[in-house]
Image (cartoon, helix red, strand yellow):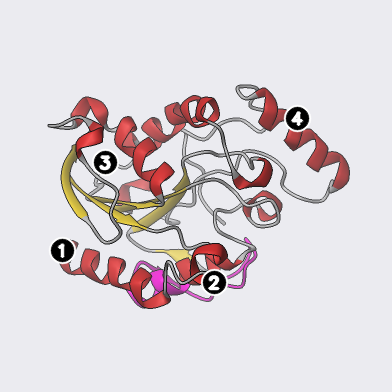
Amino acid sequence: MSASVVADPGRNCPLCPRLVAFREEARAREPGWFNAPVPSFVPGSGPRSARVLIVGLAPGLRGANRTGRPFTGDYAGDLLYDTLISYGFATGKFEARPDDSLTLIDAAVTNAVRCVPPENKPIGAEIGNCRQFLETTISSFPNLAAIVALGRIAHESALRALKPHLPLAPSAYRFVHGAIHEVAGPSGPLLFTDSYHCSRYNTNTGRLTPEMFRSVFSALRERIG
């Protein structure tokens, strides 16, 4: 299980009325599911040991919203965690449940939006409301060396969270799969890496192949050692 980061919103976070209503509907329909803002997944030794932060979009309805751990319970997690294990950012066995033996090493995983949105599509106000938690999450990792943004929304929200530390405006850093931008964060220089989101839609349409996804983490591993 993940150790909770202090930046995580409370179980009944009230900030986004549409997401609150959707959450309450899910709780009534599936009372055994997690059905709450999903906390960040960090190494068992705590945030201090994480040098890489992976930022996704939002919990999937039958994935993290069900299990309570980012990218756990749907296809995106299969590709993400298999890749992290391959490049030494995780160990153990990923079994798509929060009590498996998977342990993060040198990395943490979070989402730009912590609550599941209808149709997996958060609106602008919801992304903005949740950015305060992303800002504090980033600041919670004192040894952070890199951020991996999965998809354009994660890219834009993470850069806006870093805005006070950036040498240029967030819009100056274009989202391009495989790009590595040199930016800055609250603890110093950062590598900011982009990837298409590892969703089944992207892999089924060929927009993202497993090889393309793994190349992002291969290049990052080479840069940070």
135 magenta-colored: no
Q: How far apart are labels 4 and 3 at the CA level?
A: 35 Å
User: For residue 17, what is the image quadrant?
Assistant: top right
Q: Residue furthest right?
A: 28
Q: Residues within 10 Å of mark 2 (few under 14, many from 20)?
A: few
Instruction: Give the residue at mark 1.
Output: 223
Sequence-first disc among 4 and 3: 4
User: For residue 214, what is the image quadrant?
Assistant: bottom left
Instruction: Give the residue at mark 3.
Output: 142
Q: Are marks 1 and 4 in contact (CB under 8 Å)?
A: no
Q: How far apart are labels 4 and 2 at the CA level?
A: 31 Å
Sequence-first disc among 1 and 3: 3
Sequence-first disc among 2 and 1: 2
The residue range painted magenta reads 82-101
- In front: 191, or 212? 212
Mark 2 vs mark 1: give the one in front: 2
Position of the C terminus by quadrant: bottom left
Q: Residues within 10 Å of mark 3 (few under 14, many from 20)?
A: some
Q: Amino acid at mark 2?
A: Asn
Mark 4 vs mark 2: give the one in front: 2
* Residue 212 visible, this orientation: yes
Sequence-first disc among 4 and 2: 4
Asked which secondary structure carries label 2, the reply is helix
Q: Are marks 2 and 1 in contact (CB under 8 Å)?
A: no
Instruction: Give the residue at mark 4.
Output: 21
